Image (tube, rainbow, N blue to C red):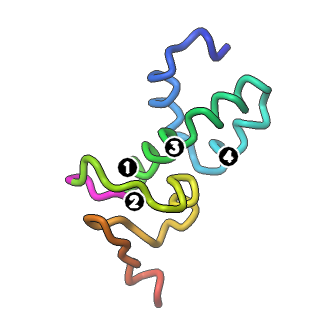
Amino acid sequence: MLSVFPVEVLLEIIQWLPFGTVGSLSALSKSWSTFMETNESSIYHNMSKRYGYIPKGDSNPADPPEGWKAWCEYPPARLVGNRITILQSSIN
């Protein structure tokens, strides 16, 4: 099934899925597991943009040192410029 669609189309679709669903795609089959592993950075980078973890005006933010997947696991932290800002709502 994966070979039916171009990678770009799959990446576009995946960014709209909930994080839990994306995390479980690797368990579907060996081909999904390989696809997810190969494209992990792009997938979670796109999701970071989609869910607002990267400011809209920041078109090319620096990669977080722990990687985009780990970055998405901590939604209260957001990238502003090249530094991490903790949202006030997560402190209270």
Between marks 1 and 2, how big is the CA–CA gap? Answer: 6 Å
Distance Cα–Cα, label 3 vs label 1: 12 Å
Identified by mark 1, the residue type is: Lys
Circles 4 and 1 in contact, beta carbons < 8 Å: no
Residue farthest to the bottom, as pictured: 92
Residue farthest along the left direction in this orientation: 57
State yes or no: discs 3 and 1 in contact (Cβ < 8 Å): no
Which amino acid, by three-letter code, is at mark 4?
A: Gly
Image height of 82 relative to 4, above or below: below
In the rendered structure, which amino acid carries the disc numbered 3? Ser
Q: Tell me whether the residue at label 4 lies in contact with that at label 3, contact meaning CB atoms closer than 8 angstroms.
A: no
Q: Residues within 10 Å of mark 4 (few under 14, many from 20)?
A: few
Magenta stretch, residue numbers: 53-57
The percent coordinates of residue 81 (x first, y second) are: 25, 65
Where residue 53 is drawn, which disc sits there?
A: 2
Name the N-terminal-most of marks 3 and 1: 3
Q: Which mark is residue 23?
A: 4
